[in-house]
Amino acid sequence: MASEYRHLTAQCLLYEDIASPINYMLETLLLHIHSEYARSKDAEPGILMVVSIIVRLAMRMGYHRDAGPFTAITPFQGEMRRRIWTAVRQADLLFSSQVGLPPIIRFSDTNTDLPCNIYDDELFEDMKTLPQSRPIAEITPATYMITKARVINLYGRIVEAVQALQPTSYDEIMKLDQELRECQATMPQEFQMRPFEESSGDKASVIMQRYTLDLLILRAQCVLHRKFLGPCRQNSRYAYSRRVCIDASMAMLEHQATLQRETQAGGYLRGVKWFISSLTANDYLLAAMIVCLDLYHTAENERAGRRSSSEAIEWPQEKRDSMMASLERSVKIWEVLQQQSMEAFKAHAALSVMLNKLKQHQAMWQAQQSFAAAYPGSEEGSNVAPEHSAAMTLGILSGSLQPNTANLFDNSFSGFNGLAAPQPSTGLTPGYTGTLEPTAAANAPSPFSQFFSNSNAGFQSLDPSANIDWVRYPLGAFFFYGLTYHLGRMGFIHSGTNRQR
């Protein structure tokens, strides 16, 4: 039925020039793009082109100006023009944001009022005046459209502020944030967000409207504050923006999980799952990317050894674990949807890569913290970047290396298979009697003498925090362990019957 309806709207448009400002042309175009948008779970580039035509045609027909001062327009026509312009403005802003482009309609381009909060049966073509608009708290068929239009209009101002070529001041950002919170607080109680468990007695369509409005507000908060995720680590003034942005993203990911569960067969919202579209999927991807970005910044700071004691900058471990859990749940949802949507396939691939990198860093960081706990006196455990202390984080310096081996360069070494061992005289080269340099001593010490004791204790005297400067000479540390590994393979270093690597 939906496919047939889409073909019928297309046939109607073929009979006339779609650029002609004739009656019902805008209404037919709006119905057609809605049917096109609802049939696919992916963003359709052609829809944005049609929306551009609709916006220009509507402005050419004067819909961006309120009909009140124009006596040639009847009250009924004026009210219908307000409703149509509301739909046009929403389509322009949402579809433009979906593909990352600025909207055509600017806030300063229009003064059209919002529709009146009245019942449909109060409207008729020959009416002389409009009835008094009811309070927004009284629910009518137009209340949801009006409430959504208020949020959309404010979201349009936010998009203009963050996309302006001249950076918007933080004071202006905070003013928009306050307006957004006031808009959320003044919404009718019917549309106020509440836990799903408390909504079991409400209509499924009303519950889905709540989620739609709340997702719009959360998305507006993310767009308004996300550019301060990085600067907040250098300036605590922006800590509020980071907290709001992350909390909004986490709430969106929670909505994704709830709606995915309840719109399945047997779920309470299965009859209205058509509300979920490519626009809402774009919101979920935005939220997941913001959470990944914040965790990435934290990982980079830890990798570089930059830590802050302020909880406004560094989240507690419980919150970070919750963020990782939300990302894992989101990736699983995208994995289920990737068979139905190309955008879901791309989202699953991108988020999987980012999540795996975050998990790798988390594992390395936990290993480093375990080493720091095992060696509380070592400076390296807390100040060295993970890649510079890989030997420590992998447990090479743990207590398992305790062989009782002979000194490799001790004169008591008996050689191989009963053969007499040559007596080294200058360190590395056995039997060498010359001089390394004109001024060098005949019996120069071995450059590896710091790695071995003079007794038969072998590695037992090796203190990782005293003998080797792991921070200054990380490559030397790796070379040392590589050397001991190969010597162990050849039988030079042993402990009982077990080879030591």
Image (cartoon, rainbow, N blue to C red):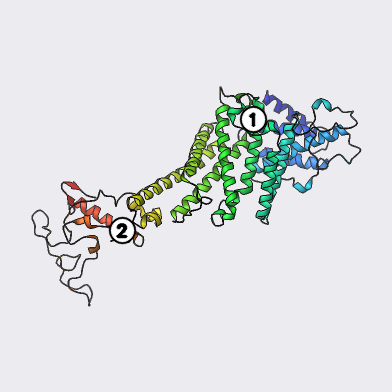
Query: Looking at the picture, does residue 351 appear above or below residue 491?
Result: above
Q: Nearer the viewer, residue 20 or 127?
A: 127
Q: Position of residue 444 (x, y in %)?
A: 20, 70
For label 1, the residue is: 208
Looking at the image, residue 428 lies above or below residue 386:
below
Left or right of residue 274: residue 140: right
* Residue toward you, 51 or 305: 305
Locate residue 143, reporting x and y percent. Answer: 74, 32
Mark 2 residue type: Ser
Cα gap from disc 2 to disc 1, whole angstroms: 60 Å
Apparent side of residue 456 relative to residue 166 in the rendered image (left or right): left
In the structure shown, which secondary structural element does the residue marked by tag 1 occupy? helix
Residue at 25% x, 48% y: name it. Answer: 400
User: Label 1 sits on what residue type?
Assistant: Met
Which corner quadrant of the image does residue 140 belong to?
Answer: top right
Judge whether residue 237 can be spotted in this image: yes
* Contact between labelled residues 1 and 2, with CB atoms less than 8 Å apart: no
The answer to which image quadrant residue 120 occupies is top right
Q: Is residue 286 visible?
A: no
Across and down, in percent, residue 234 comes to 54, 57
Is 204 rendered above or below residue 419?
A: above
Of the numbered discs 2 and 1, the one sitting upstream in the chain is 1
Q: Which image quadrant: the N terminus?
A: top right
Position of 310 with respect to 54 (left or right) is: left
Residue at disc 2, secondary structure: loop
Residue 180 vs 461, above or below: the answer is above
Q: Position of residue 166 (x, y in %)?
A: 68, 57
State the residue position of label 2. 465
Q: Residues within 10 Å of mark 2 (few under 14, many from 20)?
A: some
